[in-house]
Amino acid sequence: MRTIPRNSIAATLSISISCLLVAMTNVAGAQTAPAFHYDPMWPKPLPNLWKFGGVTGLAVDSDDNVWVYNRPRDAMDVERRAEPGTDIAVCCVRSPSMIHIDRAGNVIGSFDAPQGHGLAVDDDGFVYLGQDTVRKYDPATGQIVAEVAKTAEKEPREGDAAKAAFRREHPPELPMIVGGLEEIRIVAEDNEMYVADNYLGGRVLVFDLDTFEFKRGWGAYGKPLSEISLDDADHAYTPNGPMAKDFVGHLTLNVSDDGLVYAADRRGNRIQVTSKTGEYIEEFVLAPGTGAGGSTGGIAFSPDAEQRHLYISDLTNNRIWFLNRSDGELLGYMGGMSDAGGQFFGLHMIDVDSDGNIYTGEVQNGERVQRFVPVASPRGRVLQQLAELP
């Protein structure tokens, strides 16, 4: 186990880029973290008076366009005064829950679907949404094409006796969605879909992409599903304390090109690495003193052939952490808590396109998507020149 220690537009752009450059130069470590500039021109203003809700899913598709899954019901009264039956105003109305944005920042499609958590897009353009299960949607019609089997009821939130009875009736090896969804990842070459079900702190479940039939799954440290503890004490974590025996909660995941599964146990401040069959390899601990929601949120990879770096979104500390994928070494971080452009207020979702641009989605008071471009890219060099203007 390796432990990582704690540690007008022009005006706004200059301040934001200065903040990011300071953040990137004030980190320890012999190696250099990737460097990015906030892109204030992406996305363009939403059409139709739309206002984003909290972003609970974000995915870059095979054309490097971005899908955003958001919660329109997050909008407060003052954010929807243009809706029929409300105050007469020119701002704003709730957006569809699914919005498709191109590389230039233009909205190129949308459809409505029930709110949820987790999003993936396959090579054919079908959209997979985490709701009370995984549902596959045709983006052209917004219609459900298929869904993964799920239990008829969810675990009670209160009452020890009721929870114990539910767990006896729904053992951890149950081959269907029991809790709810945190993450969906598609591995096209294997024709498989990886799902992070939040039951019992989190379970990694793998399904056939065509039939949606269950294939395999595992818990923390690669243990068989049947060995996941029903005792909440085994899923408990205290900041700076020992690692929990089972996943703690809010499990997300991603799969590297060389066949490793990275499962981020957010409330446990750690990332566990396994093979595609669940064989445990190692664990990276990140900012172990973080309480509240934890430090390890979404996982993305750098776009180089070796995928040398992990990009980790941190909802609690509102940073993107940069780690060496080979050994989990912390290289640096980007961002801090602020509602200014280039900073984060509820950093939740993260993905990367083929050019290395980072896309983020926020909840809480953020409720926006942002793009960060590599400093060495053509756009990054222009933004650097703008930042250096007096």
Image (cartoon, rainbow, N blue to C red):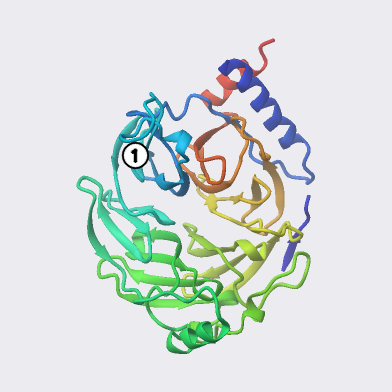
Total numbered badges shown on the rendered structure? 1
Residue found at x 49% / y 82%: 225
Q: Residues within 10 Å of mark 1 (few under 14, many from 20)?
A: many
Q: Looking at the rendering, in which quadrant would you find the C terminus?
A: top right
**Which amino acid does the dot numbered 1 rest on?**
His
Check disc 1 and report its element: helix, strand or loop: strand
Q: Looking at the rendering, in which quadrant would you find the N terminus?
A: bottom right
In the picture, measured across the screen, residue 32 lies left or right of residue 79, that is right
Q: Is residue 358 above or below residue 388?
A: below
Q: Give whichever of 386, 307 is nearer the camera.
A: 386
Any part of residue 69 in sight: no
- Which image quarter: residue 8? top right
> Percent position (x, y) of residue 54?
48, 45
Q: Is residue 195 above or below residue 94?
A: below
> Percent position (x, y) of residue 386?
61, 16
Q: Give whichever of 15, 123 is nearer the camera.
A: 15
Q: Give whichever of 338, 389 is nearer the camera.
A: 338
Any part of residue 365 in sight: yes
> Percent position (x, y) of residue 243?
71, 72
> Percent position (x, y) of residue 32?
71, 41
Residue found at x 62% / y 57%: 296
Q: Which residue is mark 1?
A: 100
Residue found at x 33% / y 54%: 114
Q: Is residue 357 above or below residue 153?
A: above
